[in-house]
């Protein structure tokens, strides 16, 4: 149980450090995307939030790279071509650890909340 309590904090610290290390790559990726393309409204808001918006923006670029459906963006959009350039693929790949670390911390927090609910209702 203590591991589940400490793990989200560790993930938060690690993801923040990863953000600081990759901040220039992250900002350059967003600025290059916005030069010839328009971000959909929710992502435009998230890209201005710094560290707190970085997981969603990283998810956005990972989905672009994999050519998977993105909310508020048509599947046949020209925006999907952005991730096919070699330098952009490398930048997106450098941001993946940030996304997965943040995601791991989120799921640990979710699991803690679920366990707390079970304890509250005397199921455990």
Image (cartoon, rainbow, N blue to C red):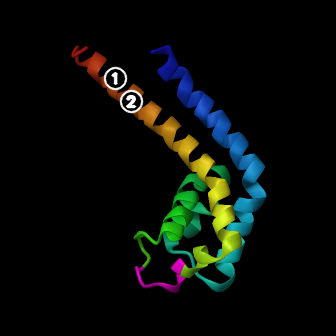
Residue drawn at the location 52% of the way across and 36% of the way down: 105
Q: Judge whether residue 83 can be spotted in this image.
A: yes
Answer left or right for 112 relative to 51: left
Q: Is residue 49 visible?
A: no
Coordinates of residue 24 in the picture (x, y in percent) = 78, 59
- In-image side of 108 versus 122 (left or right): right
Residue nearer the viewer, 93 or 4: 93
- Magenta-drawn stretch contains 78: yes
Name the residue rendered at 46%, 31% in the picture: 108
The span picked out in magenta is 74-80
Question: Where is residue 31 shown, x and y percent of the image?
Answer: 71, 73
Residue drawn at (52%, 70%) of the image: 64
Find residue 115 and name its label.
1
Residue lying at the far front in this picture: please name it. 86
| Mark 2 lies on residue | 111
Compared to residue 14, the image places residue 96 above or below, namely below
């Amino acid at each position: 149980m203590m591991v589940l309590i400490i793990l989200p904090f560790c993930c938060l610290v690690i993801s923040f450090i990863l953000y600081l290390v990759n901040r220039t790559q992250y900002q350059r990726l967003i600025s290059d995307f916005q030069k010839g393309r328009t971000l959909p409204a929710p992502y435009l808001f998230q890209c201005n939030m710094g560290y707190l918006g970085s997981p969603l923006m990283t998810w956005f670029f990972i989905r672009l790279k994999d050519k998977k459906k993105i909310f508020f963006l048509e599947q046949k959009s020209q925006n999907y071509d952005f991730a096919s350039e070699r330098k952009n693929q490398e930048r997106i790949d450098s941001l993946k650890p940030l996304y997965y670390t943040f995601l791991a911390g989120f799921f640990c927090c979710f699991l803690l909340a679920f366990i707390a609910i079970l304890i509250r209702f005397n199921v455990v």
